[in-house]
Amino acid sequence: MQLIDIQRNYDTVISLGGSCQVAAQMARHSLRTFSGPIDWFIFPSVLCLTKAINNRFQGFMEYHNLEIISSTEMNYVVRDNVFDCYSYHDFPVSCNGDISPHYPQFKEKIDRRIQRFYQKLMDKESILFIRLNGESEDIRELVSVLGSLTKSDFTLLLVNPSTEQTFKEVAWDIPKVCSVEIYNPPNLWSGCDQDWDVLLNGINTLDNLASDYNVFYG
């Protein structure tokens, strides 16, 4: 699929992560109308993501699988050792290495977002998924799993970052997939606004706007 083919209206737009960049750019373009389960995680592996989606996130971010691996100025970086998924925003360093008091509220939030994610898959007739980072064969499997879980007319926009300051469409022979490469500025987690403007131009969502609470905290 070419970029021009996907620039249209959708019932909803859903982040399939990779990093927080996708959710941030969706919000900047008023396309993020609800909080998804992996919006604010670093989730590098498409295969692990596919497994999580196919198994309805069973075992995802369970307490006994979590490990503190480092910290930022404000929060611990916590890794799910089963899914190779990283939380940067949920466990403050003020807890002094004991994340257990914050875990029940965290898990409740994640479970709520997972339930919402699958409800969207069931309810919506047209969905645009956006994923940052992925190889063709892994993406092919992801598309197959998504197709088994929704009756929606869906499209996947795959965005691979590049060190080159160019915008490039990549011709992948995978139905329902539009693949592009965009410039990834060093040390700028939110990505290149100019390239994302090109990507998301003409894309709109008909999904009902959620409240600020649901979009950012729900």
Image: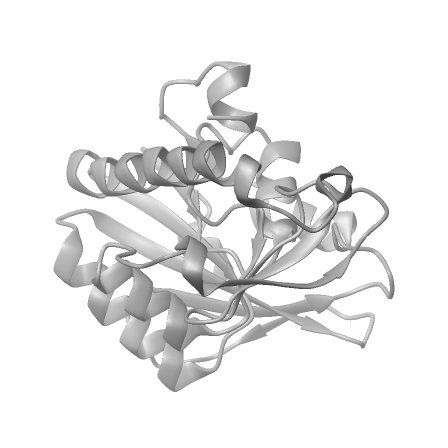
Percent coordinates x, y for residue 13 in the rendering:
41, 40
Can you see residue 1? Answer: no
Q: Residue 125's quadrant in the figure?
A: top left
Up-down: is 125 above or below 86? above
| Residue at figure coordinates x 66%, y 43% from the top left | 89
Percent coordinates x, y for residue 190 in the rendering:
74, 50
Percent coordinates x, y for residue 170 in the rendering:
53, 77
Q: Quadrant of the N terminus?
A: bottom left
Drawn side of residue 16 relative to residue 195, left or right: left
| Residue at figure coordinates x 36%, y 25% from the top left | 207
Question: How many marks on residues?
Answer: 0
| Residue at figure coordinates x 60%, y 46% from the top left | 99
Q: Residue furthest bottom?
A: 137
Q: Residue 206's quadrant in the figure?
A: top left
Percent coordinates x, y for residue 92 in the rendering:
71, 40
Which of these two is toward me, 39 or 10?
39
Drawn side of residue 197 relative to residue 34, left or right: right
Up-down: is 172 above or below 14? below
| Residue at figure coordinates x 22%, y 63% from the top left | 54
Q: Residue 24's quadrant in the figure?
A: top right
The colour scheme used here is: one colour
Can you see residue 125? Answer: yes
Which of these two is toward me, 69 or 48?
69
